[in-house]
Structure formats: structure tokens, C-alpha cells
Amino acid sequence: MTDWTTVCNLNDIDPDTGVCALYHGEQVALFRWGSSDTVYAINNFDPIGKANVLSRGIIGSLGERPVVASPLYKQHFDLQTGVCLEDSNVQVKPYAVQVAHGVVQLG
Amino acid sequence: MSKKRIIVVGNGMVGHNFINTLATSEHASDFEIITFSEEPRLAYDRVQLSKYFSGSTADDLALTSEAEYQQQGIIYTLSDKVVAVDSQARTVTTANGQVEGYDRLVLATGSYPFVPPIPGKDQDHCLVYRTIDDLEAISASAAVSKTGVVVGGGLLGLEAANALKQAGLDTHVVEFAPRLMAVQLDEGGGKLLRHKIEELGVTVHTDKATTEIVAGEACRYRMNFADGSHLETDMILFSAGIRPQDELARQSGLDTGERGGIVINDYCQTSDEDIYAIGECALWDNKIYGLVAPGYQMAKVAADNIVSALITHSEPSLSFQGADMSTKLKLLGVDVASIGDAHGHTAGSKSYVFNDDIEQVYKRLVVSADGKKLLGAVLVGDVDAYGNLLQLMLNDMDIPGNPANLIVPSSGAEDSAGLGVAALPDSAQICSCQSVSKGDIAAAVQGGCCTMGDIKEATKASTVCGGCSALVKQVMDAELTALGVEVNNNLCEHFAYTRAQLADIIRVKGYTTFTQLLESHGHGHGCEICKPTVGSILASFNNEYVLKDEHIGLQDTNDIFLGNMQKDGTYSVVPRVAGGEITPEKLIVLGEVAKEYDLYTKITGGQRIDLFGAQLHQLPAIWKKLVAAGFETGHAYGKSLRTVKSCVGSSWCRYGVLDSVSMAIALENRYKGLRAPHKIKFGVSGCTRECAEAQSKDIGVIATENGWNLYVCGNGGMRPRHADLFASDLDDDTLVKYIDRVLMFYVRTADRLQRTSVWMENLDGGLDYLQEVVINDRLGICAELEAGMTKVVDSYQCEWKTTVESAQKLKRFSHFINADEADRNLYYVRERGQRRPATDAERIELVSLDAASH
Ligand code: SRM
Ligand SMILES: Cc1cc2nc3c(=O)[nH]c(=O)nc-3n(C[C@H](O)[C@H](O)[C@H](O)COP(=O)(O)OP(=O)(O)OC[C@H]3O[C@@H](n4cnc5c(N)ncnc54)[C@H](O)[C@@H]3O)c2cc1C
Ligand code: SF4
Ligand code: FES
């Protein structure tokens, strides 16, 4: 069974924006989809721009895929898999995430 | 069958292209490819070499990598030179003594810079311009020099001069011939180019033969010229032409030309049929081709020939038939193009010349005796017609109508070169670097390509020099239209509208949020293109706080935290300093804040002060202090008004006729916070000496004896453009009224990320039309435009003041939502007394130090 760790309240994340959470020493970018309670979690480190900034990117959709555009050089990362759409050899780590009772949990 | 061994001597652009052609062909597995590079690296893009001075690294220029070669099984040796070929034994020997046997040998040794035999040429700081190593030597020399001379005013010489200019040297070009770019340009073109280049501050000396280089008095060296004159300089760059690198061929008895070059036949074979020569070292029909495109054609031909000889035992399908040497370039920011017989050498040819001293445009057409065919052309200052003229010549098409129409600027919107891409035959070569024809592009479109990105990937067109990109796009669009696909000017996949259309929709419907617009006129969830665009439109019309809950998700990288993101994820802080005027007290506050947070401090090009390296969680405290001291945000992050540059004007300057500082401050305060399709800059000068450089701004204002002259739509940056005189001798009120109207019209109708210059150039009717709309109210919208501006001016708020006053908004300004820690990935070193981000190499050391201390 997954051990879930609470990192923040859902309402700490403004609709359609991201925040960064510290989780077992790792930086995790959390994104809230519109004002729904769907939250995506991928590592915050942009492997192309080489900085901890992904949580500050704009989120949106390309085709059916939910993505974030890096705020540095605008490559897109799939929010579900962490794969970079411009270069499939590049991937950031995705995390298991759930929203329960208004809190966001990583596992 | 054992693999055939192919040895390629030289891993330059053409050698690599050959290897790549063979290694990606269906017969790749039949070959073992071995290559030697005298340089310490594999092939890189020499054509873009000068970019090294504007920030590109050796890695950016690389055309391949060692890993890629290893993966393809290509055997390579770096920093070793092939010194002998034994064509009997079919072996090569390198300087390090390595011996390798071959089945076929390909010489792709390129060329070397020619240095005229001038006494004194071999001293330190006398350099050439060909390789990355050369550029490193030039940078090092420029760093300890004040003055630099380029010997040679040809194409490469002028590129080299640009590099010296960028390095901040007092730059001179010394040319032996009576004019610049004598090979490509005629006298008129050379003259105008010289004039333009001198305006940029490069001194040109023609008709100068250097006799010796001796020690100088004021500088390191003195160059003495045959005519008795002399010039002092600290460094010298020779760019007096190239010579084919044919040493190996001479030594091993292959035929070479009288003036150098390895003689080849139409299959790129040398006088020994097992040895090929391709690229700049090869001499075909007594001609050397000093450009990359013909080299790539030779590479293709040689690869095809080798496959047919060794593998398929069939007739070769390709042969080299010469190449066109037309070129289009930007030299020191000046557009220059030369097509075909530019000098009118063809018997009976006639010329048409267009010369505009005011706009500084020179064009010359060379046409056949009957005036029907285009033979050549020279264009300086305006090269828009290049693509069409080149196609007319290459395809031997009849000139439509009067040839003069091809170079006379058109009065209306019709295409001045008078030729649509539809008229081109399918065989027309559109991209010469990659030899891609119109037919190839059409086929790619039929195969499903519908964006430039698709076309580049499918055909490789426009991936080398990029000179063909406009034409490739035209062909693609024409092809899409022919297929019944509506050419896509859509903002992105979420909105089937242009920015201007969305602006109209928002204005007419009175929308105030992105969600309203997406629900009614879009689909999907939006993206990083449409969200900021719509955010900007909403802000231009409604001017609400950009971090308001419903707008926050729309803001781009910089706006979302009201600061410019730096490469390491920290931010810069730029308070407004209207007109560049600042009190000593405020300067002290800036100094104190910078000191407290150890911010790197720099005066910007916009007459204000930038403080770099603030972390997200530090921004609120920094801005609280600044706001308390009376500062406001400078919107350095926004697509909005940036700065109004001023000169000191009549209050102090003995020449000033009006108070330019007061006007600049008033204008900056009026338009601050105005969100627009792109950033907007102003300049206000107190007299015609123009110390504020107003004519290089979107809005320029210059004082005259009778009022203000208003200039519009200029800019610096990537494609500088002088502003156009819009109206003269205006009083203060009329000036402001016109600016209100111009800017609001721009905000409503321009494309995303389109600056005022490009916007105006794309307006049907251009400047005349804009004057009609703004001065004579031709569309009857002036009252509305002014009302729109008044609304923005009246609803101004300092975004940082609003933010520091809102506890809820400040919560976002921390690196972690669940911890007070800072980002641990930031590393700095100190340079000239301030901090800067560590480079990759420095980081490795610092990171391991950091790890050791934990
Ligand atoms: C700080 C400054 C350089 C400096 O150290 O002097 C600067 C820095 C940046 N410039 Fe600039 N530009 C600065 C003056 C200029 C000037 C000179 C001027 O304004 O007189 C120009 C040419 C004039 C012009 O714009 O017409 C200039 C032409 C550009 C361009 C090219 C624009 C173009 O149309 O080609 C860009 C890229 C863009 O905007 O897309 C750019 C973009 C940038 C950005 C915003 C790039 C970015 O997104 O990170 C830089 C970040 C600033 C920061 O982090 O604070 N910057 N930039 C100058 C800030 C002036 C200010 O006080 O606000
Ligand atoms: C600054 C600059 C700007 C240019 N701009 C343009 C442009 O805009 N458009 C354009 O079409 N062309 C341009 N060119 C020309 C273009 O770069 C050349 O045409 C192209 O590089 C030729 O390719 P190549 O492979 O024949 O020669 P190179 O690229 O010179 O490669 C030859 C390589 O072989 C190596 N070599 C030589 N002898 C030996 C040996 N015996 N053993 C091992 N290695 C050896 C050399 O060190 C070199 O690395 C420019 C050139 C320069 C320098
Ligand atoms: S532009 Fe004229 S008024 Fe302004 S500083 Fe220069 S000389 Fe003086
Ligand atoms: S012509 Fe050079 S890339 Fe197409």
C-alpha cells in the first residue's frame, strides 16, 4: 500500500498554476488543473534549462495531453509522464499524487 | 563480403556531410568509414562561425558529436593530420604515424586563409578567421587591444570586422581593391555598402596595399601602405581570400590547378579514379566553390558514385553540374545580395539601376540584350526581392512586364518583384544549401506537413543558412492553399483566430477573463502561447491587476512573479527611473538594497539600474523597501512600456531648445503599465543632435525651434529600424494625442510579439495609412482610441505596491509551498567585486565542495 505524505492544501495552489513542494529532499512541481481537484506532480528541475523552475511554467493542453511549458526555454513536459514533447529522450520524474479531503498528498 | 573501407580526410562541413550521407544510406552496413580531423573537434557549422562572438558555444555550432559517430560505427581520429597518401598501396599515413588502408579515398580538406607575404605578418596578434581555434585566439587578442584592423574587404573580412566591432574595438577595414566586396558587388553597390558600414563606426580604407607591419607608437603595430600613408593598430586579422588545401594531392601526384585546387570530373573523382575530392579543396571546370551548398552537392555525387562503383555496380545516377554562387547576407547589419552575373559581363547585357540616397538603397539588375531574361542583380539596403529574382534567373523565366518594376519600390501592397511562387516550375531550387526544390516541398505538404517545423524535418530545407525560410514558407502556404487547406494564421491549436481578431472579440463582447473567451471561441485548455496573449489583450483593455486570481495562470515566465527570470531561476529587480532622472537619495536606497541582498548591480541600456540574483522569497522584502522609498515597478518584465530615454535638454545643455527631461518623464508616467503585443520604448531629445537616440525607438520625440517632431516605429534589437518622421512641430497636447492614438491602434491590431516596426510595415499602405488613420481620422475611430488610452492611464496601479500590500498574494513568493528553505541548486562566484552564477565547469567544483561539507 502506498504511504501518502501530505504536502499542502489544495487551495494553496491557485487555479491553473503550479507550486513547488519539498518531498523527501526532492523538489516536486505540483500543478492544479483549472479549479478542479486534479493535481499533477513532476520533478521541479528543468533538465534543459538546468534550474529548479518547472513549477513556475504555464500549464495547458497540447492535443489531449496536459503539459507544462518550461518558463526558461519553453519546452513542453507531459504532466502525466514527465516526457519532454520536443525531445523524447528527455524526461523528468513523475510522482504519484492524490487529493483527499482538500489536501494534496504525494506517494 | 567484407566491408569496404572509405577514408575521409578532413572532417569539415563537407566531409561530414559526405559521411552522414553514406552512413544514413541503405548501404551503410557495407562500409567502414574512417575519418581524420586536423582540428581538435568533429565537424561544426563554419557558416555560423561568427555567432561564436555573439554567445554561441562550440557545442552550439557542432554538426555532430563523438557519441553520434560512435553509435554510427564511424572511426575518427581528432587532432591528427594526414600527411601522405600512397595511391599504389592505397594507404594514408598521419603525422602521428598511423597508417590505414582504403578502398576509396575522399579528400575533403577545405581551404586555408591566404595571408599576403607582407614583412611582419608572423608576429603575435596577427591572426586569421577560419576555425574555432582562430576565434579563441581573436577573443584573447581583442581583450588586450583597443584598435583592430581587418585586411581584406570581402565577405569574410566584413564578418570579421563585425566581430571586432562587437568586441568593442575601434575597427578598420583595409582593402586592396577600390571597393568593398569587389567579387560580388558593382561599384554603386560597393559605394553604398561602404557608406553604411562607415555610419556604423567602422573605418574603411580602400586602394591600400600594405607594405610592412612594424612596431607602432600609440598602438602595438603600425601598418605602412604603398601610397606612403600608415595606420596604427593593436591587432591585425587577415582575410584576404582563401586557398584550396591541396597539399596532399600535390604531394601524391594528383592533378591540381594552376592556382591551386584538386582537379575533379563530374563524378568528383580526381586524376586517380579511386580518390575523390569534394568541397572547397576541389576544382571543377577550373572553378573553386567557396560556399557550402555546392560542397554538399559534391558530397552527394561522390557518395552515389562510390556506392555504384563498389556495391551496386550500376551506372552512377548523379553528377556534379556546377552551382549557383548567388548570396544574400547581412554584413554589419547591412543587407547585401548578389545574384548571377552581377557585373554585367555577359555580352550585350543591359542594366537597370535604382539608387535611393535617402533610404540608402541600391539595386541593379542585369538583363539580357532583349530585356526578357534576368542575368544578375546587386541589392544593397533592401534585399526583399532576392528570392524572387534568384528564381527568375535560375529558372530562366521571362521577366513579367517592364524589368524596372522588379526594383522600383511598389506604391501599393502589390509584390514589387512581380512574381508569385505559383509561377515557379517544380524543379525550382528553393533551398540551395540542402538542394530542396519546390517540388520537394510540395510533396512534403501533400504528405501531411503543414508547419515550417514539419517541412524542416521532412525536407531539411531552411536548416543551414536560413536564407530561404521566407520563400519556403511562401511555397508551403501556396501549396496548402492549392490543397484547399486554409493557411493557418491561427494563434495556436486552441484558438482559430489571429491576435487582432481575438482583440476585436474581447473588445466587442466585453470579456474580462480567459475562461469566458476559451468557452465561447476556443477549445482545449490553452497553452503558453494563447494564455499570455489573451492576458495581454485583457490587460490592454481593462488594465486589471495582472496577478488577480483569474489572470494569474495566464502570465508568462516574467510577469507571473513580476521580475525577469534569470538562467538559474532567480530574478532581476528593475524599479522605474522615469526619463533616467534619479535623486541621490534614491540612488542610495538602491545601493543599500543591493548591498543587503548581495544583488549584482548594473546600469542598463535603458537608463536605469538592474539588480540581479534575487530569489523568489526575497522579492517581497526587496520591493517593500523600494516601494517605501517611493519607487515603482519598472515593468522590465512586461510586454509593455519599458523606458523613455531622455537627454538632458534645455535645462542644462547649451544646445537644447526644449525641456526633453520633463517631456520624457511626463510621457513615461502617462504610458507606464500599458500592456501591448510587444515591449514599447520611447526616446526624447532636446535638439536635433539627438543624444537620446529617439529615432531608434518605437516612439521618438525630438525638439525643434517650433515644437516637437514625432517619429514612430523604430527599434534596435535584432533587426534595427530607423523610426519614420510622423508629424512635425507639434505642441505638447497634439503630441500626446497622436501618441495615444498610434499606441492604441497598435495594441488593437498588431500580431503577437510584433513590434511597432513590423506592424507598420505590414499595414496595408504603411506609414501613409497610419498617418491617415491617426492625423485625419480616416476610420473615424480616433475618439475611441483616445478613450481606450484614457481608461488605461486612469486605472494605473503599481503592481508591486498592490502585491506587497496583499498577504494572500505574497504567499506565492516562496520557493517551497511546504518549507521555508531556499533552492539549494544556486551557486555563485565573485567577479569584479560582485557575484554571478557559476558556469557549468565551476558548478561541478562548487557542488562537490558543498557535498563534502555536508
Ligand atoms: C537589462 C538590459 C541589458 C543591460 O544590461 O543593459 C536588457 C536585458 C534584457 N533584454 Fe534587452 N535589455 C536592455 C536593453 C535593451 C535595448 C536598449 C534600449 O532599450 O535602449 C535593446 C535594443 C532596443 C530595442 O529594444 O529596440 C534591447 C533589445 C532586446 C531584445 C530584442 C528586441 C527586438 O525587437 O529585436 C530582446 C528580446 C525580446 O524582447 O524578445 C530583449 C530581451 C531582454 C531580456 C528581457 C531577455 C529575457 O527575457 O531574459 C533581458 C532581461 C532583463 C532582466 O533580466 O532584467 N532585449 N534590450 C537592458 C534593460 C533596459 C531597461 O532598463 O529596461
Ligand atoms: C567565417 C565564415 C563564414 C562563412 N559563411 C558562409 C556562408 O554564409 N555561406 C556559405 O555557403 N559558406 C560560408 N562559408 C564557407 C563555408 O564554411 C565553406 O564553404 C565550408 O566550410 C567548406 O567545407 P569543407 O568541408 O570543404 O572545408 P572545411 O569546413 O574547411 O573543412 C576542412 C577540414 O579538413 C581539415 N583538414 C585539412 N587538411 C587535413 C589533413 N591533411 N588531415 C586532416 N584534416 C585536414 C581542416 O582542418 C578542416 O577541419 C564561410 C566560411 C567562414 C570561415
Ligand atoms: S540632444 Fe541636443 S539638447 Fe539633448 S543633450 Fe544632445 S545636444 Fe543637448
Ligand atoms: S538556402 Fe541555406 S538553408 Fe536554405
Image (tube, coloured by chain):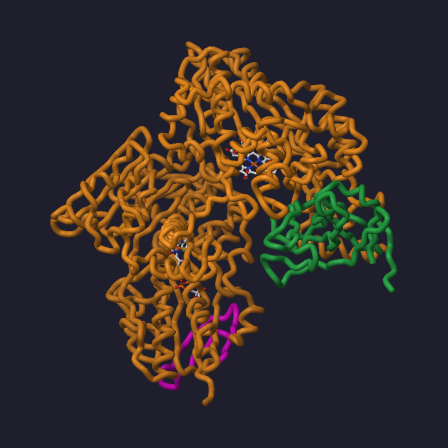
Chain colours: A green, B orange
Between B812 and B29, the residue placed more toward the observer is: B812
Between B31 and B598, the residue placed more toward the observer is: B31
Residue B356 pos. (x, y %): 28, 32
Name which residue lies at 50% across and 62% down: B63
Name which residue lies at 65% across and 36% down: B559
* Above-or-below relation of B536 to B144: above
Image quadrant assignment for residue B704: top left
Magenta span covers which residues? B76-100
Q: Quadrant of the C terminus of chain B?
A: bottom right
Image quadrant, ligand 2: bottom left
Indicate yes or no whether the magenta region holds residue B721: no
Image mark count = 0
Residue B145 pos. (x, y %): 51, 42
Q: Is residue B298 visible?
A: yes
In this picture, residue B796 sits left or right of residue B52: right
Name which residue lies at 67% across and 23% down: B797
Residue B517 pos. (x, y %): 60, 37
Indicate yes or no whether the magenta region holds residue B81: yes
In this picture, residue A46 sits left or right of residue B89: right
Q: Farthest residue in the front direction?
A: B520
Between B636 and B521, the residue placed more toward the observer is: B521
Q: Quadrant of the N terminus of chain B?
A: bottom left
In this picture, residue B475 sits left or right of residue B588: left
Image quadrant assignment for residue B84: bottom left
Residue B619 pos. (x, y %): 75, 35
